[in-house]
Image (spheres, coloured by chain):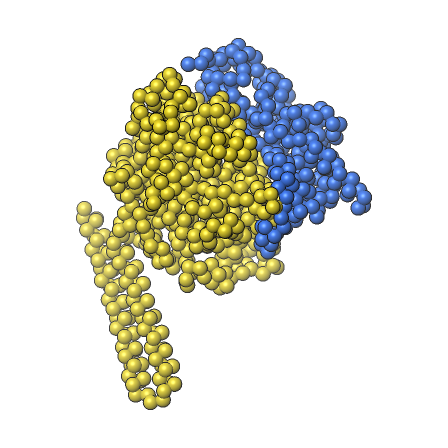
Chain colours: A blue, B yellow
């Protein structure tokens, strides 16, 4: 039997987007190192409910690192100290007994707080709606093998496509930029012959939407790449810039 | 007893009346034929005679067909002692299997572009089925309102599917065809699905791959640039397309991008963080929904000419499942309570390769893709003392010599080996663990070993194929699967049962459609791997956009209704009353604590091995839990604000009712088929023993009011094209 952990949690509590927020401190004892971070939060909430207090609101869904819903800023890192994972995959064995853990929401002007640790990331959807797609309708499509795609291009596109839209890149960026998110989509689609046709226009539309929604600009600090749970590389930002410059030439 | 006799007399009476009618009809027709034959005899002109003879032939076959089908229905009604659903009720098109869908499309009604603009369609859910349907309908010109409970449509649970999607492309030239995909699916479902629906699914499967490639889904490719395939359980061909270990995510992002394009154009109005809490029926037709804004807590009314529900499965009734935390069966249960039939609720799939349960605090189970069974070999120790030593942590799996390992799937099923269908693999694991050969600290785990594959292919190849899955496993279990075998155990994963729908994917309530996992239609008693993604996208891209027009064509004159109409106001009031009732209980127990209790009952009695006695116990216990919930649950906070405990409580209330339906259905079905295993009905070798004589039907449950037993309505499954066999994966 592994040793159970006794922890102190400092959690950001905020009633609504315009309410004033503050850290609240909670003591939590007897946490198994095998439990996940979110299971630890469940236990804390269960404790709060039993005390007839308001449980902490946080977003979560699949709890296997793929849906991109969970979003906690833990000890100064989006998705916590471990690398290449989301909050739901973080396990308590990454923490020491007696440790104080600070939990905050994603902080960015473009992601207003809904309540406590829950933020509104619909700005990401709006960027995709502005052009993050290939303009095809359902049906009347040529055979899937009609255009061969080199394995390298397919794999590189897959690397970019593995973005889960969680927003960690924005949360960690000192400028609050969504460049890695936008770049991943632009890069994925421009690497494929099907998406190449609209590549420049897509880059332009998505970037202008990004600016409009209050995200900052990219100054190449690379924090986004370091904190991305899917290890998406900033080389995709270079590809985005190439497409964007291409759009300028066309204009 | 008297009541029973009364019903029996009535049935007898109906039968004799109907039989008389048929007899009379048949006699009339025979007389007609005889007259014609006389005519022929009298006629001397040769060509005239041939023409008449042809006519006679036609009449003759018509006579026998009419008599046969009427007799069949009467016979099935007598046998089943109640209402049945006929192929005609299910709108199965005429003609040979391969022509049915084409025939349907040729004859169905369509809506012209000008009229499409005047019609509103509500789509609930943004998973593969919901997003693809919403996007496709909007592209065609309908006004679409699309709802989801998540903060973004991209987060629907389809995203978690890992392994792949089936299609009958036959790119590897290994003998695949539409028929073979159809046949494997019917057989994999243990002959409890409708032939016509499954054939259509196989038929449209190829278009799905083309569609997704066009959307920019980065499927895995060979060095030559063409699409790569892998094999999956229940098939002897390689027909599974995949995008690393994230196929569901990539397909969903494809559908999401198509949906986003329509949102950007204003053709789809998107409602995120909205929970559907009821369907509104006006004059017998579905005309809208009641949904709660999860951020403000406000309950709102929405109108549409038709409602499409694609809200996934109800596996979370078990509390611990591979479903996402938010996945729920509430939309389905509300439809059921409004009169839509719930079909085969007992058919739930237990997935064989999940990470075993490790503690009481556990919130969900994690699936390891079935694709791992392509290269992983499943085993437990041959000797009980080795298993005991492993459980006591005195031995490591790598200490067990090759000859002391029992690769039980390869031993029992030489033809399919580790790639037997999911239900078979799950039961085999349970059998070994129940017999005392299980590993892990609880003894409820088996090994999935990659050492052979690593030796044969090299670590790099294994990493390229399964890297993200291995990483996920290591993060959860803190064990390196490249070095020690993975531990796996079955868990609830998917529900084949769901809302009854006809061939058009419409429930028995006109205007209410149900797509994807939420309906019952294509997987029978067991779903094959990589077929869920196929079905979701088939329904949303290529089936519903056609079939819904056949309904909407008659609705073009119906003006948009005000949501102040009585039916909407009443439905909203009922929802608010229910919410207030829950808020007012102010009991002592958290929602999760009651949900966990329900989950344990479901797993113990309605899980992998079911018995009549156990199911009766489950029914009693579920009724007690319902009472506990409605008298002792505690929901903090307010109803008119963001309140996640209230969301969970509303869902749990419905899971309790679903759990009861599942147990009831499992008790009724005195046979073993697919994922439904009744311990009383098995072959001497421990395989599922199906009973086609008595249970070859879809069990549809009709709600009859609070506290009443639901009414059973059967849809007999007559297999016209496939000969049913005992499933055999041994040879």
* x, y percent for residue B518: 45, 43
* x, y percent for residue B267: 62, 49
Q: Residue at x 28, y 56 (%)?
A: B76
> In the picture, residue B320 is in which quadrant?
top left
Q: Residue at x 41, y 26 (%)?
A: B357
> In the picture, residue B15 is in which quadrant?
bottom left
Observer able to see residue B130: yes
Q: Give whichever of B643, B185 is nearer the camera.
A: B185
- Counting labels gives 0
Q: Residue A93, relative to residue A234: is it above or below?
A: above
Q: State the residue lying farthest toward the bottom.
A: B44
- Left/right placement of residue B499 relative to residue B289 reads left
Q: Residue A21, relative to residue B572: is it above or below?
A: above
Q: Residue at x 22, y 59 (%)?
A: B13
Q: Give whichever of B288, A159 is nearer the camera.
A: A159
Q: Residue at x 54, y 60 (%)?
A: B110
Q: Give whichever of B235, A95 is nearer the camera.
A: B235
Q: The C terminus of chain B is located in which quarter?
A: top left
């Amino acid at each position: 039997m592994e040793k159970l952990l006794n922890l102190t949690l400092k959690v950001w509590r905020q009633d609504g987007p315009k309410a004033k927020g503050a850290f609240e401190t909670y003591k939590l004892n007897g946490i198994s190192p095998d439990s996940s971070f979110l299971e630890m939060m469940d236990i804390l909430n269960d404790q709060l409910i039993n005390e007839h207090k308001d449980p902490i609101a946080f977003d979560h869904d699949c709890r296997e690192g793929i849906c991109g819903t969970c979003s906690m800023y833990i000890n100064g890192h989006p998705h916590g100290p471990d690398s290449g994972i989301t909050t739901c995959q973080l396990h308590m064995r990454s923490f020491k007994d007696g440790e104080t853990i600070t939990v905050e929401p994603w902080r960015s002007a473009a992601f207003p707080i809904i309540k406590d640790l829950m933020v509104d990331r619909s700005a990401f959807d709006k960027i995709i709606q502005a052009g993050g797609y290939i303009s095809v309708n359902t049906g009347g499509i040529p055979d899937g093998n009609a255009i061969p795609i080199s394995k390298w291009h397919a794999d590189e596109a897959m690397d970019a496509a593995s973005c889960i839209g969680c927003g960690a890149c924005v949360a960690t960026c000192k400028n609050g930029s969504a460049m890695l998110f936008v770049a991943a989509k632009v890069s994925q689609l421009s690497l494929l012959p099907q998406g190449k046709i609209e590549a420049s226009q897509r880059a332009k539309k998505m970037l202008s939407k990004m600016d409009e929604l209050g995200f900052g600009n990219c100054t190449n600090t690379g924090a986004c790449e370091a904190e991305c749970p899917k290890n998406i590389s900033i080389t995709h930002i270079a590809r985005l810039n190439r497409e964007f410059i291409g759009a300028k030439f066309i204009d | 007893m008297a009541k029973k006799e009364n019903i029996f007399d009535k049935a007898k009476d109906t039968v004799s009346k109907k039989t008389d009618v048929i007899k009379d009809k048949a006699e009339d027709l025979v007389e007609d034929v005889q007259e014609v034959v006389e005519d022929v005899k009298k006629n001397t002109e040769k060509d005239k005679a041939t023409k008449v003879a042809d006519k006679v032939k036609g009449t003759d076959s018509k006579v026998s067909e009419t008599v046969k089908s009427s007799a069949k229905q009467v016979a099935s009604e007598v046998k089943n002692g109640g209402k049945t659903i006929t192929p005609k009720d299910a709108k199965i098109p005429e003609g040979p299997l391969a022509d049915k869908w084409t025939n349907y499309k040729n004859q169905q009604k369509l809506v012209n572009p000008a009229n499409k603009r005047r019609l509103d369609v509500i789509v609930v859910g943004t998973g593969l089925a919901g997003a693809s349907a919403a996007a496709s309908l909007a592209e065609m010109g309908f006004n679409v309102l699309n709802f989801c409970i998540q903060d973004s449509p991209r987060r629907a649970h389809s995203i978690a599917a890992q392994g792949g999607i089936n299609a009958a492309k036959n790119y590897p030239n290994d003998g695949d065809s539409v028929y073979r995909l159809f046949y494997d699916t019917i057989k994999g479902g243990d002959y409890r699905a409708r032939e016509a629906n499954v054939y259509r699914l196989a038929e449209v499967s190829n278009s799905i791959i083309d569609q997704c490639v066009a959307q920019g889904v980065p499927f895995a490719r060979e060095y030559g640039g063409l699409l790569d395939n892998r094999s999956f359980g229940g098939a002897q061909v390689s027909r599974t397309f995949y995008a690393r270990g994230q196929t569901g995510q990539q397909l969903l992002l494809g559908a999401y991008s198509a949906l986003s394009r329509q949102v950007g154009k204003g053709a789809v109005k998107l409602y995120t963080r909205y929970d559907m809490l009821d369907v509104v029926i006006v004059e017998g037709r579905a005309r809208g929904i009641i949904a709660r804004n999860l951020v403000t807590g406000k309950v709102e009314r929405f109108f549409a000419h038709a409602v499409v529900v694609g809200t996934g499965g109800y596996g979370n009734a078990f509390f611990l499942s591979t479903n996402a935390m938010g996945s729920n069966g509430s939309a389905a249960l509300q439809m059921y309570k409004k009169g839509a039939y719930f079909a085969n609720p007992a058919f739930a799939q237990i997935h064989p390769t999940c990470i075993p349960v490790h503690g009481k605090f556990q919130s969900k189970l994690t699936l390891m893709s079935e694709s791992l069974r392509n290269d992983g070999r499943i085993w437990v120790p041959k000797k009980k003392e080795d298993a005991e030593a492993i459980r006591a942590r005195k031995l490591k799996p790598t200490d067990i010599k090759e000859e002391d390992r029992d690769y039980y799937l390869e031993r029992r099923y030489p033809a399919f080996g580790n790639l037997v269908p999911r239900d078979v693999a799950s039961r085999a694991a349970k059998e070994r663990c129940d017999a005392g050969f299980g590993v892990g600290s609880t003894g409820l785990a088996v090994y999935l070993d990659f050492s052979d594959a690593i030796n044969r292919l090299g670590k790099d190849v294994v990493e390229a194929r399964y890297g993200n899955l291995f990483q996920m496993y290591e993060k959860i279990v803190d064990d390196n699967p490249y070095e020690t075998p993975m531990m796996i155990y079955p868990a609830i994963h998917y529900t084949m049962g769901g809302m009854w729908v006809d061939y058009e994917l419409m429930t028995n309530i006109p205007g209410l459609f149900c797509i994807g996992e939420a309906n019952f239609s294509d997987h029978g008693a067991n779903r094959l791997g990589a077929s869920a993604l196929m079905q979701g996208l088939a329904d949303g891209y290529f089936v519903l956009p056609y079939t819904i027009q056949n309904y909407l064509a008659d609705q073009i004159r119906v003006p948009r209704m005000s949501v102040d109409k009585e039916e909407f106001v009443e439905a909203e009031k009922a929802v608010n009353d229910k919410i207030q009732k829950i808020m007012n209980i102010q009991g002592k127990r958290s929602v999760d604590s009651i949900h966990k209790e329900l989950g344990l009952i479901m797993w113990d009695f309605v899980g992998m091995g079911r018995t009549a006695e156990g199911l009766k116990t489950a029914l009693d216990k579920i009724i007690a839990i319902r009472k506990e919930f409605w008298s002792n649950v505690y929901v903090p906070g307010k109803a008119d604000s963001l309140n996640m405990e209230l969301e969970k409580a509303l869902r749990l209330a419905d899971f309790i009712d679903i759990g009861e339906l599942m147990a009831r259905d499992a008790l009724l079905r005195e046979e073993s088929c697919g994922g439904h295993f009744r311990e009383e009905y098995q072959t001497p070798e421990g395989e599922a023993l199906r009973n086609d004589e008595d249970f070859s039907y879809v069990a549809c449950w009709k709600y009859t009011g609070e506290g009443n037993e639901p009414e059973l309505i059967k849809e007999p499954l007559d297999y016209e094209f496939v000969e049913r066999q005992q499933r055999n994966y041994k040879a």
